[in-house]
């Protein structure tokens, strides 16, 4: 397993534990972190043992977005930002398009591009004291890291505009009620709950989960007829796989299924 400067990656029992590891900088996205994140996510996609991704942040906060302190005084800031966003956007695309379901555990706060990482995750648990804020326009910048793509889809255009224009801070409960995250758990149970959820998914049917993820993520960009055709193709393929056979047999035999990669 590759060692990264700003990322910690370990694959255990089918779960890729992917941790942003710049706690002294609120896990702010620097050029090095963006590059490390891209490399780590691509490594996960190539690892047959990584059935699920558990995305976390070290320290008190999940991700504070861009590392603004490092931007001060740079004459080449526009070029520097493009250098950061290249690998960051590759990482986000791979998280969304990859087979493995992505579970995020958010503590403290998610801001700026941290909102993009939340949006790119399939299931998101947050500690009850967690906060969510776009923050871009407050410092004279515009959204990046997929935040402006996911927000309208998750919370609706009107609320996305409000969050972006006013930089309103959402509590964890509000983020859940608005559809930005999946569930709120007590702060001291966040790690345990997120690891349990990731383990549950890792024990599930990997091919079915991957196909279902693709269906759901492509549904908003598809006509009904085209999507129905993809559904028919996916379930037909699943029914003919060893995974499908095991799932059906275990249901009929009233026993827990045992799924393995074909």
Image (tube, rainbow, N blue to C red):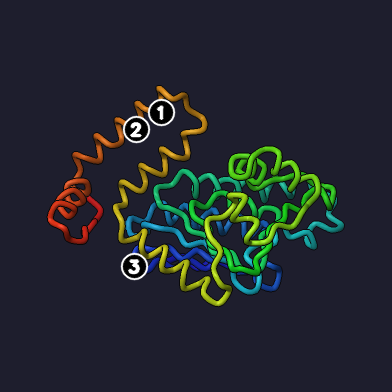
Residue sitting at x 43%, y 47%: 98
Q: CA distance from mark 2 to mark 3?
A: 30 Å
Left or right: 259 as drawn, with respect to 202: left
Left or right: 64 as drawn, with respect to 238: right
Where does the image place residue 131, in percent across and percent down from the top left?
68, 62
Q: How packed is label 3: few (under 14 Cα within 10 Å), some, or many (20 or more)?
A: few
Q: How packed is label 1: few (under 14 Cα within 10 Å), some, or many (20 or more)?
A: some
Q: Is residue 79 above or below residue 12?
A: above
Question: On the rendered image, what quadrant is the N terminus found in?
Answer: bottom left
Q: Would you name the residue on which mark 3 appears?
A: 13
Q: CA distance from mark 1 to mark 3?
A: 34 Å
Front residue of this view, candidates 200 and 53: 200
Residue sitting at x 60%, y 53%: 177
Where does the image place residue 27, in percent across and percent down from the top left?
65, 65
Q: Are marks 2 and 3 in contact (CB under 8 Å)?
A: no
Q: Is residue 170 above or below residue 90?
A: below
Q: Is residue 6 visible in this depiction of the protein?
A: no
Where does the image place residue 113, in percent across and percent down from the top left?
67, 53
Q: Would you name the residue on which mark 1 appears?
A: 227
Between tags 1 and 3, which lies in front? Answer: 1
Secondary structure type for disc 1: helix
Q: Would you name the residue on which mark 2 appears?
A: 231
Left or right: 65 as drawn, with respect to 77: left
Specify which label sits upstream in the sequence, 1 or 3: 3
Q: Residue 217 has which mark?
A: none
Front residue of this view, candidates 260 and 232: 232
Q: Is residue 192 visible in this depiction of the protein?
A: yes
Q: Are marks 1 and 2 in contact (CB under 8 Å)?
A: yes
Q: CA distance from mark 1 to mark 2?
A: 6 Å
């Amino acid at each position: 397993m590759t060692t990264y400067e700003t990322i910690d990656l370990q694959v255990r029992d089918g779960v890729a534990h992917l941790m942003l590891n710049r706690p002294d900088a609120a896990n702010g996205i620097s050029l090095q972190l963006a590059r490390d994140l891209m490399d780590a996510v691509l490594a996960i996609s190539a690892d047959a043992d990584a059935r699920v991704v558990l995305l976390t942040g070290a320290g008190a906060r999940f991700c504070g977005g861009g590392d603004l302190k490092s931007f001060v005084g740079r004459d080449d800031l526009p070029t520097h930002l493009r250098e950061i966003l290249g690998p960051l956007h590759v990482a986000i695309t791979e998280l969304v398009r990859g087979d493995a379901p992505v579970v995020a555990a958010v503590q403290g706060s998610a801001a700026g591009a941290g909102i993009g990482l939340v949006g790119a995750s399939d299931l998101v648990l947050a500690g009850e004291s967690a906060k969510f804020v776009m923050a871009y326009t407050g410092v004279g910048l515009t959204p990046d890291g997929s935040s402006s793509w996911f927000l309208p889809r998750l919370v609706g255009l009107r609320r996305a505009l409000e969050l972006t224009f006013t930089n309103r801070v959402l509590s964890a409960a509000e983020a859940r009620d608005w559809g930005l995250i999946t569930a709120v758990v007590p702060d001291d149970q966040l790690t345990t709950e997120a690891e349990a959820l990731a383990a549950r998914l890792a024990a599930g049917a990997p091919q079915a989960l991957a196909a279902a993820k693709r269906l759901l993520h492509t549904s908003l960009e598809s006509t009904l007829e085209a999507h129905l055709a993809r559904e028919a193709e996916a379930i037909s393929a699943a029914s003919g796989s060893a995974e499908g056979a095991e799932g059906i047999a275990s249901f009929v035999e009233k026993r827990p299924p045992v799924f393995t990669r074909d």
